[in-house]
Amino acid sequence: MPLFTRRKAEAAEEYRPLAELPPLPEPPAPGPTGLRSLEAHRKYLLSCVSELPPFRQNLLDALDLSLCEEIVAQVDLPRFDNSAMDGYVVRAVDVANASPDRPISLPVVGEIAAGSAALHRLSPGTAMKIMTGAPLPEQADAIVPYENSDRGTSDVRVFAPSAVDQHVRHRGEDIEAGTRLFAPGDVLGARDIGVLAGIGRSTVMVRPRPRVVVISTGTELVEPGDTLERDEQIYDSNSFLLAAAVRAAGAQVFRVGQVGDDGELLKRVVTEQLLRADLILTSGGISQGDYDVVKAVMPEVGVCDFASVAMQPGKPQGFGLIGPDRVPMIMLPGNPVSSFVSFEVFVRPVIRKLMGAQPYVRPTVKAEAAHAMTSVWGRQQLARGVVSYTDSGRCQVTLPGGHGSHLLADLARANALVILPEQTEHVAAGEPLDVWLLEELLG
Ligand code: AMP
Ligand code: MG
């Protein structure tokens, strides 16, 4: 399916007046502290987006995508009895008494390579050369590997017996025709792609990679590679951080880059992007500041919900369904750490739902606190942690960096997010904690 035909709208500009768009579903009520719980907000976002419709994809391009069909093997694998070794195909009974001292000599009456057929059956008292993967001739039931022979060409001397079925791969022993191999929702890894190719599939029905547009907002932002001309300017790290995280989550990313704090410009850029977006991500501009334009103008082009979520970092959060096609848009806070943590907590699950990949949320792993920790009561803290294994093999976590949500280097050093629940204020050394591993741990 061509990229741009997934949306209904003819032209991005032709959006209906906002009054005609249905409102968002009722957002969850805030908790006793006046803040919305992280779980309630995530559940709300997930309830507002649907899985993308499936399409037929070439097998290799289906890597990491979620299957939308049941796959039943139509063939046996192996398709025919064949040799597991290079050597000689024999009848086991003919070599039963072979030994190094008393080798058995058999005439070599043929040769079968992988990809060639066994032309005739094996007569008693004879052998044929056979290569790995070549079909067994009728009446043969064992393989003598080269290592147990003198590698003879017209006659072969066999130095050891081979039992019936030795080094023989049987038809259907791997997969029997009619076996159900995959179910809808299975996410295809490299080995699954191998099996599918092995049973002859060249395409599969999968949900597509969501197309995610990433925009950062802020008049202070400068594209990396350009020159910082004034002291108050900074490089735009968020659009790169988020775009990379989108890609790592398995989606296709369009990094638009930075837009200044100009409401009209922002509306235009977002509207232009609707056509190629299954999800739009922005960073910045959703707090209480005078220049927080995202919050100010997005309700003019879509139905939006801005919430204070009981988490740290990442308290301000925005969500909308934008334009006539109601493209989901997640508006993240601008501080780099807040924006990344919000990505992990809300955006990654939404991307996974769009892709149809379960579970939406990362699995939690238990790790022991390596030292005492503190947290803010009433806010779920997602601290940047370093998880490692002790010499005795215990999984432990430290919080090496500072708390500031501007600390990019600490974020990059971390390999996990440590989840400190809303009611936690103190954690003693040795207490078990829930963590999300952000990368594979070696050792
Ligand atoms: P905001 O949420 O727009 O008020 O931004 C909060 C803080 O994050 C400010 O210090 C911004 O300069 C910083 N910030 C916002 N966007 C980015 C970005 N794309 N890259 C780096 N820092 C940013
Ligand atoms: Mg800003």
Image: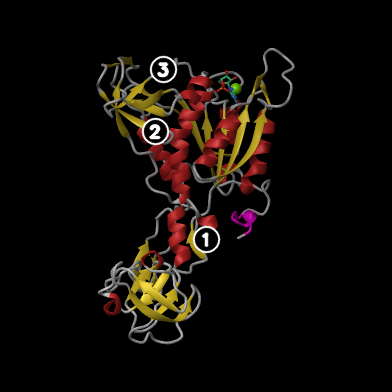
Outermost residue on the top side: it is 231
Label of residue 406 in the image = none
Q: Are marks 3 and 2 in contact (CB under 8 Å)?
A: no
x and y, in percent, of residue 121 in the image: 39, 86
Q: Is 252 or 36 nearer to us in this picture?
A: 252
Residue 46 occupies quadrant: top left
Q: Quadrant of the N terminus?
A: bottom right
Cα–Cα span, label 2 and label 1: 29 Å
The residue indicated by pointer 3 is 400
SS at mark 2? strand
**163 falls in the magenta region:** no
Quadrant of the image where one finds ligand 1: top right
Magenta stretch, residue numbers: 2-8
Mark 2 neighbour class, 10 Å CA radius: few under 14, some 14 to 19, many 20 or more: some
Q: Which of 235/116 is in front?
A: 116
Judge by depth and name the residue closer to the eye, 416 or 85.
85
Count of numbered circles in the view? 3
Mark 2 sits on what residue? 437
Say which residue label 1 marks. Answer: 59
Tell whether 89 sits left or right of 247. left
Q: CA distance from mark 3 to mark 2?
A: 16 Å
The type of residue carrying mark 3 is Pro
Counting residues from the start of the chain, the first of labels 2 and 1 encountered is 1
Quick check: can you spot residue 413?
Answer: yes
Q: Residue 428: image x %, image y %? A: 26, 16
Say what secondary structure mark 1 lies in: helix
- The span from disc 1 to disc 3 (Cα, nearest Å) is 43 Å
Q: Is residue 88 above or below residue 310?
A: below
Give the mark nearer the N terminus: 1 vs 3. Answer: 1
- Tell me the crowding category of disc 3: few under 14, some 14 to 19, or many 20 or more residues within 10 angstroms, Cα based: few
Give the residue type that dot 2 points to. Leu
> Who's the residue at 36% across and 87% down the image?
123
